[in-house]
Image (cartoon, rainbow, N blue to C red):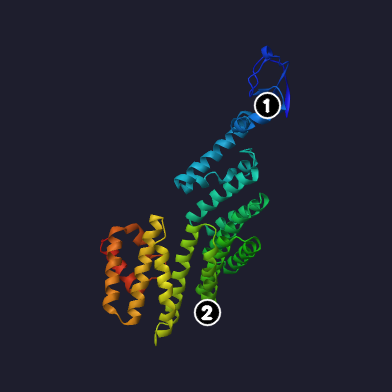
Amino acid sequence: PMSSRTKEQKCGHCKKGAAEGVAELKACARCKSASYCGKECQKAAWKQHKKWCLALSLSKEEAAVVKIRGDVQLQCMMGNWAGVLKHEGEMEAMMAARVDGNPNASRERLFDEFAKAHWALGNHAKAARYHERRVEMLGKVQRFRDQGDAMCQVANCLQSAKDVDGARKWLKKACYLAKENGYFSVECNASMLLGLQDLREERTPEGIEQLRYALTVTDFVEDKFTGIHLEVDIAGSICKALLRQTPHGDQTAVLAEVEPLVAQFEKATYKATDPARLQTYEFRRHDMTAHVMERRGDKAGAEKQLQIIAKLARNNPRVATAFMYSGGLWDPAYNMLEAMKAAGQF
């Protein structure tokens, strides 16, 4: 929309004025700063004009809120979570502010930033509530794939907050949404999380079955590298579950199941391109190989794998520390890394 304006000046698009026979220019009704000779020129110029139209039209109060909104984004990018949460009291004002032309998308980003801050500071229940609000907003803007991912994030937060039933409910919702719309990455991730939850609840057969199903879905994941990372995580989780299920007695049957999974895990790790993840996968690969060798009775081979893990730990102390506390390590590997850390070797 445009309001009448009679000052002699040039059209913001075609650059024509009174000298070129334009009798009257009309100003943008929102910012009143740009003028056009007609709707066609205004429409043609909108792609560039919209970048600063909103900022020019803000009141002082709105501009102040947008400044706060920008600080939340900056603190989030810097990982200063306390700096993010200091603005939590101004949430309603930030939600009402005209940050851009898509208010629901803007609010979704805001909820995501506060969820990240609460998660990082251990406030898992609060993080879950913000992700629930994200689910609602993503539905409004019809970003259903992202909505499924947000449902999985709600479940992760609720699991950490010890709300197991709530987490399972959200994971089932994510699976249903994914299957209805063909979002294989969401379906794979939600199925994997359901399987891991079964394992935590000592429902091992159900958990392994769920993880096996998730592993079959990795072949259809839309993004190749996401599929690789999911394949690595799921194959590794099944291996650990199978080995834990049969700690004693005849190992022939369990090793017949585990060894192809270890091979699949190794094959997938070589396709990974993210250096940080690749380093973590290397720790897990040698840990699983050592565990399998020990079950076979190859103690020398298992010891060799432990020495490789020790070398990796000295070269990558940060990754080694994270790997130690990720859970599921073979006991000898964990004990070795714990002793190395206590001795200051990494």
Across and down, in percent, residue 330 comes to: 37, 73
Choose between 81 and 105: the one closer to the eye.
105
Across and down, in percent, residue 307 comes to: 27, 68
Q: In the structure shown, which secondary structural element does the residue marked by tag 2 occupy?
A: helix
Q: Which residue is mark 2?
A: 205
Choose top left, top right, bottom left or bottom right for residue 135: bottom right
For badge 1, the amino acid type reads Cys
For badge 2, the amino acid type reads Pro
In the orientation shown, which residue stands out farthest toward the top? Answer: 19
Left or right of 252? Residue 305 is left
Choose between 188 and 72: the one closer to the eye.
188
Q: Distance between the Cα atoms at labels 2 and 1? A: 66 Å
Left or right of 320? Residue 264 is right
- Residue lying at 64% horizontally and 62% vertically, measured from the top left: 177
Q: Is residue 232 above or below residue 101?
A: below
| Numbered marks: total | 2
Choose between 308 and 10: the one closer to the eye.
10
Q: Residue 322: in sight, yes or no? A: no
Q: Is residue 199 above or below residue 277?
A: below
Choose top left, top right, bottom left or bottom right for residue 7: top right
Would you call the spot at circle 1 few (<14 residues within 10 Å), some (14-19), or many (20 or more)?
some
Choose between 76 and 234: the one closer to the eye.
234
- Residue lying at 37% horizontally and 68% vertically, measured from the top left: 285
Would you call the spot at circle 2 few (<14 residues within 10 Å), some (14-19), or many (20 or more)?
some
Across and down, in percent, residue 185 comes to: 55, 61
Q: Which residue is mark 1?
A: 41
| Quarter occupied by the N terminus | top right
